[in-house]
Amino acid sequence: MGDPKAFLKIHRKEAGYRPIHDRIHDFGEVEQTLNTKDRQTQAARCMDCGVPFCHWACPLGNKPPEWNDALYKGDWELAYRLLNSTNDFPEFTGRVCPALCEKACVLNLMDHEPTTNREDECAITEHAFLENFVRVEDIERNGKTVAVIGAGPAGLATANQLNHRGYTVTVFDNNEAAGGLLRYGIPNFKLNKEIIDRRINVLEQEGITFKYNEKIDVTKLPKGFNAYVIATGTPTARNLEIPGRELKGIYLALELLSQQNRILEGIEFKKEELINAKGKNVLVIGGGDTGSDCIGTAHRQGCKSVTQVEIMPKPPVDDNPATPWPNWPVILKTTSSHEEGCERRWNIDSNKFIGKDGHVTGVEIEEVTWEPNPDGGRPIMKKSGKPEIIPCDMVFLAMGFLRPKQPEFAKNVFVAGDAANGASLVVRAMDSGHKVADNIDKFFA
Amino acid sequence: MINGLYNAEYEHDACGVGMVVNIHGNKSHELVDNALKVLENMRHRGAEGADNKTGDGAGILLQIPHEFILLQGIPVPEKGKYGTGLVFFPKDKQKQTAILSIMIEEIEREGLSLMHLRDVPTSPECLGDAALKNEPAIKQIFITGVTDDKVDTFERILYIIRKKVEKRVDDQDFYICSLSNKNIIYKGMLSSLQLRQYFPDLTNSYFTSGLALVHSRFSTNTFPTWSLAQPFRLLCHNGEINTIRGNRGWMKARETVLNSIALGDTKQITPIVQPGMSDSASLDNVFEFFVMSGLSLPHAMAIMVPESFNDKNPISEDLKAFYEYHSILMEPWDGPAALLFSDGRYAGGMLDRNGLRPARYTITKNDMMVVASEVGVMDFDPTQIAEKGRLQPGKILLIDTQEGKIYYDGEIKQKLASAHPYRQWLSTNRIQLEKLKSGRKISNSIDELVRHEINFGFGKEDVDNTIVPMCVSGQEPTAAMGNDTPLAVISERPQVFFNYFRQQFAQVTNPAIDSIREVLVMSLSEYIGRVGTNILTPDESNCKMVRLPHPILTNTELDILCNIRYKGFNTVKLPIIFECEKGGEGLREALMDLCKKAEKSVDDGFNYIILSDRDIDETHAAIPSLLAVSAVHHYLISVGKRVQTALIVESGEIRETMHAALLLGYGASAFCPYMTFAILDDLVKRGAIQENYNTAETNYIKAVKKGLFKIMAKMGISTIRSYRGAKIFESIGLSENLLKDYFGTSVSTIGGIGLETIARDAVRMHDAAFSKKTHTDFLPNIGLFHYRRDGIDHAWNPETISKLQISTRLGSYKKFKEFTAAVDGKADPIFIRDFFDFKRNPIDINKVESVEDIVKRFVTGAMSFGAISKEAHEAMALAMNKLGARSNTGEGGEDNDRFHATVDGVSLSSKTKQIASGRFGVTTEYLVNAEEIQIKVAQGAKPGEGGQLPGFKVNEIIAKTRHSIPGISLISPPPHHDIYSIEDLAQLIFDLKNVNSKAAISVKLVAESGVGTIAAGVAKAKADLIVISGAEGGTGASPASSMRFAGISPEIGLSETQQTLVRNGLRGQVRLQTDGQLKTGRDIINMALLGAEEFGFGTTALIVLGCVMMRKCNLNTCPMGVATQDPELRKHFIGKAEYLVNYFTFLAQEVREYLAEMGFTKMTDIIGHTELITLKKTEKNSKASMLDFSRLLTKEEGNTSLYHTTNQIHNIDSVKDVEIIKASANAIENQEEVSLDYAIKNTDRAVGTMLSGLIAKKYGEAGLPTDTINIKFKGSAGQSFGAFLVKGVNFRLEGETNDYFGKGLSGGRISVLPSSRSNFNAEDNIIAGNTGLYGATSGELYINGRVGERFGVRNSGAIAVLEGAGDHCCEYMTGGRVVVLGETGRNFAAGMSGGVAYVWDKKHDFDYFCNMDMVEINLVESSSDQKELHELIRQHYLYTGSKLARTMLDDWNLYVGEFIQVVPIEYKRVLQEEQVKKLQQKIADMQRDY
């Protein structure tokens, strides 16, 4: 801990986003960076808690007190080594992680000014790539081979862990490039895809083989491997089966997001396949991060307006007594995409899609209220009985993903990430990858 | 066979001692009678057992009463030609005959005969039950037949006979009290008053003697110990030998080289130290051995209990050389001691180097002399008194009754020092390491550092949190909030072997030392080399040694040591490694091999042996250095070759002071922590620290030195030479076999691991380091201090903290159960109680006592306002008062506004008021507003240590509650300066009971082995409540090593206490409280089963109030506003009393549920019922599976209660104050003036205290109007005269007073002057004892005479004028004025941070006696200062009529120039700042007005 009183003198300073007028015309990353000095000063705010709740809250067990200290002292290399020792890909999490650590930070409890762990993480890693601290390790092989199915965060983390432990790893993916939802879900304005390529390059140099466009049926796994890891994620999005669903102009969120990312990668689509919100009134159903990504993407495509509806009530601002510190606080979250312009409504259930000429023109919705469940379970929804119509030309369904059902596997087959646990955060997927790697170690021990 | 945890080794005693001598040796029965009276007048210094009748022991040493013996019809030859003595025999006749035949055999072997056997008449009807049960048959033997040529050596022959008989007879009931042709000793398990009754001999008017030593014992227990009564053969001892284990061990080791010409073959009299006896008995054994070998009494005394001879001591160089020469041969027997000794001709007395026991003497004009722990034990006509004095620290006083001469220290020592040219012997033979240089360059770096660090178990915290602070600031790091990690033996992680040990520390039975403020008695210098075989013969060859200034060797120094070739020094390095593959067996072989090699090295004449683990490699792991050194040390002792060599350890393991202390404590003379030096080298090279290597190394060594001082000092030991090998540690989790084989003991409290596991751990660490996969980018953080998910388990982790906070805030019992489930259901055990479960036999919960009843058993821990914020402190008081339970002020006092303030009708006043060594805010008013007064003897986080509240934390309100001024540091001394022994504690309890008879007096102890025995002593000292605090607990900051390594688990301490109290029949008289990481109902049940009836919560309470275990209490940066005084941060405090109410209510509810499950309706049904505990299953082959809880869970059977049932009898109904209060009723009620006169005796203790309590209760701090109650006393006042005297009460004492006068003075005025009829010079004589004015907050004290040691300690506001003082005057003073019109002892003003002292520097040498660390000295120049001084002396004259004061006032201008003013630097700065502020305010006001 550099300065035990820094937290009293220095306020949290976020790098912030590029100005809206500037950023909504391109797909470049919206987040800015602090200069080195400010970054180090921010790191000084970490109090090196006796019980670091950040470290506990992080599924990966990242240790912010340790690398923040190194960062504060200017030892960027040590900071990276410490960070990388628990986190395979801090350049991803440094961009897209909701930072459970920051929510659990004691400074968040004290005055809602937690340390800037996520940004610190990102800065440390960018610095590491810049200064060539990222090593290509020469790894001694243990003679065991593993096939990893799926190159999303879980698959990549598993592959990386196993590779470093001496396994010979081949990663299969049904897409044309690695990254999974990092590449085909998260918009470029949050995660530039070169960041993924840069890391894949390191992994390849360290000996991992990647096989793309391989549609593997998990019931018929490729022969010749000592063990298998299923890291195929949650391919099925939750649909909204209400009247009018067949109308044109209603898409699953990922249809939009993955296409947009591919377009930016230079892949061409037929005109009739294109999903473009230009000049349209857009409705996003679902109030989560994916919905938010749809909003940002629609803006960049030049939409006329965006409305987002969510079935659950509006969460409280700042503090939620129901989810006290150090738990993840269920509070109102306003993303960069929201800032860019959006009407947000809560307690909205959708009754039916309304269309004209086979094309969607609006959605009949209805306000609801939620009443506590006497049995203690999920609250009970009560409709208001006053339907109304939101007119729109395009609807994105961002209502989460269905938990996949996995068949009975042989003993040498392990399931990692969302494929095992349902949709969740990148850090959770990576953590799951670590556990699978440990289990494989134990399996062969 | 030991079943429970009680071990006789732990016994302590203390006492009153006295000596009556006719300087010319004129014998009379009157003298015997007087001696017995002296003893009887010190009865309050002895103790009685649970039956209130059995004494702990009393005895008398006299000259053989020749005429009396003849009158008994025993035809003894002339004086000096027969030997006699009392012998204790077993009652069994057959056994008696068998023993007698052995005695006769040995007597006849020396050509003598057993002439007569006398049945000594006794009156057993006066004995208590316990004494009676073990009463021996007492016979007096008479040995005659000495030929004329052997009369001179007759004493010696008798000694040899006695030693031989002792060696041959193995019977516990057999004991020879004495066997001499000069002295005889009568003693037994008696009280002071019983001695005379029990032995009618002593009252026979023909029984005469010219000298007498008497002793009454206060033992911590009441087991049959007839033989341990004192005096012993040559001496009686009031005090305690802290280094006894080491002294005994070294004595045994030395037996092979103690060749005595006088005694002949030493083997016939070994063991010199009779086994199974007390420390005092062992001291006597060795003293006697030296004397019998031909040393004079003072010579032998000076060797065994040398005074301190470092630079701070004003003694001659020759005498220093004398001490140094002897220190090479013998380590000091260290500890508080008032020693009185006599061989029948000479009689003398001596004090330990620090003067930790009182001893006052009076010499009369008719050549009588009385030396005793107290004055007033014998009545003298004031006109007859020639001199009054005291024994001084380290000084001897000797009377030769044959010559009729008194020898004072100077003369005696001068004679000793000039007996041989010690100075020259030393300078030509002894080498000083720091003076040697070599040109060789030694590298400090290590290749592959991280790998080696991992091999030796280093973690990132070891470097960042331990080594870096040490090498940067030269200090040990501070840590906070206790230790909540598992014991080494509970954790399955590989452990550094040092982790299995815990430091022991002094509590109650002897004082810890302040190694910083009293450094003058401390020493780290060491001698290494080969002791010759003839150390009893003075010779220069005995000092061919290397002197080390301290035991830490740098790589360079070690290299020099290895290469001193000249003067015949040579050395050998033995590797301490073993083959990894061979595991435990390999380790065993390696150790055996090592021991054999060491033995051979001794035979080969090597001066020292270096044990080194530098040679580890891929196949060899290091033997834990402590194991290696202890194995070799004990092996060499067993083969009689230990003192012929010195052991030096070169190990990579060493990093902390604890490691250093352990190695020294188990026999090493020096050590080289080469890995630490390599780390320093790396830190410097990496630029991680600013220092260069040399500075870093110097700082590191400085930190270790300070740490060693502290660790020694907390046991009350002042020299490393007596610490070495003294094994002031206990192990937890090592098997008895291991301890027996390698550590010279077989006492293991809970069993544990053996060599197999030690080897496994060493190999695991080795493999972790040397495996190819080991990454070496950085050292991993294993979460020792700060929680890490993948690190060491912590009981307080995010899960438990957040669950506790959320449940208590929401008031949800359901969530609380989630919390307790997380705590109780943790995957791996952390505490001993985690292995326990209990038997079940469910009943209906409605039958169980209520939550309201149970909750009263809960208290919050002592956390001072000052350590924690006002908000947190008050929230706790409110919560506990709401519940009808008790909160604790902590040691920082309490704002007196809170005594009567309420919030919603609930009092803000803490029911428990603590009184600690600093006595902060301890006023009479504070004490009378308590329901419980807690004497904090030790605290869990740092037992045996003092503390310091830095000036920057002392704001207005804290200064107010602590009676100081803002901005100055407040130091808490390590010991209570009025508790140096168990009888002192009894006195303090008596004082407190007087001041507030309604309050329960509790004594807080910290768990360590032996704490049960101490608790028994505390119970006998009449405490109402005993707290056994677990070492794991602790809020706030403390030195990191103390937090982890001092004290043991509460389970062990509690269990030992319960067992010992029950065994002694004392349990029913006291309540027993425990604390230490208690959290859940299950914890409560477990601790209750082990014997506790009340339960303390510190950390848990803070967490409920918002603490998130930042462990930053020492930085004042607590972000939750709990442990900080920063007003900004305090705004973040989110706690509410309500949350605590929720917590304790939930906890009580959970306890109820468990009680119902167990089938009991009340808590008292389960207290102490260890048979209800069942053990949980442990995993096979795990470390935990090797634990053995059978001793811990032993239930002592006795017909006494297992919990508190009856109250103590405090005997305060008949104190003098009862009379005084009656006489002052009108003054107290109506504030009308009253004047009274009383005679006073030394048995009138704490006079004025009860009266003061009464007034404070009625009038608070204000007391009575000035001069309302005026009392004159005549005589010798007992201890604590005028303690806590309040405003409006004036005491005037003509005569003298004992220790602790004016303690806690709270506004009253005391003057002491010699009797008007006396005609000695007042200013030359001691008329007041030690530790006067301790912790006074206001008031005045005038003494027309000198006072003893430690006057004015922690005075924070009183005014005092006296005419001479002993050592350590004004120590830790923070306010008030002290004027000394005369000489002072050493170490004046040590740790003084406030107030002003004026000293009349007649001899112009005051600067030598003043400790200048915190103060500056000036002439009294400013007119305001001169005026102040003049006024003080004028007052002194007014109240005492001092002649000296008159003289000074008459010639003021001359005398004022001879005064020195002593002002603390910090105090001066604060005063100046205040003045500047005032000035600025004035200017500002003026400008505004303008």
Image (tube, rainbow, N blue to C red):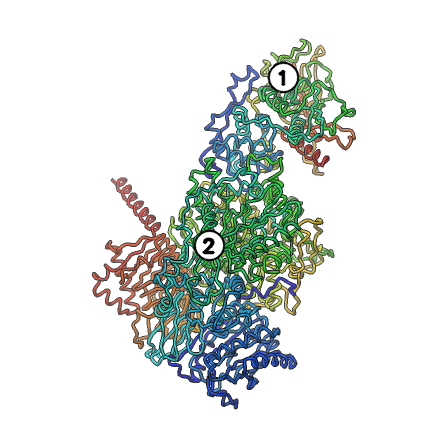
Q: Position of residue A17 (x, y in %)?
A: 52, 22
Q: Nearer the viewer, residue A114 or B53?
A: B53
Left/right of residue A285 with respect to residue B1264 in the rendered view: right
Element marked by disc 1: helix
* Above or below for B1320 versus B774: below
Q: Residue furthest top?
A: A271
Q: Is residue B1286 above or below residue A6?
A: below
Using the rendered image of the protein, determine whether residue B1121 is visible from the camera's viewpoint.
yes
Would you say residue B883 is visible in this rendering? no
Residue drawn where x is 72% and y is 12% of the image? A358
Asked if the residue under mark 1 is in contact with the one under mark 2, i.e. CB atoms within 8 Å, the reply is no
Vertical comparison of B350 with B696: above or below: below
Chain ID for label 2? Answer: B
What is the x, y in percent for residue B1283? 42, 65
Q: Residues within 10 Å of mark 2 (few under 14, many from 20)?
A: some
Residue at the location (48% across, 33% down)?
Answer: A72
The amino acid on which the numbered mark 2 sits, given as a three-letter code, is: Phe
Q: Which residue is mark 2?
A: B569
Which mark, by number, is residue A261? 1
- Report the number of discs: 2
Q: Left of B1405 or right of it: where is B1174? A: right
Disc 1 sits on a residue from what chain? A
How many neighbours does mark 1 have within 10 angstroms: few (below 14), some (14-19), or many (20 or more)? many
Quarter of the figure with residue B618: top right
Which residue is at the front of the view, B737 or B482? B737
Q: Position of residue A107 (x, y in %)?
A: 52, 36
* Residue A245 screen position, x and y as percent: 72, 18
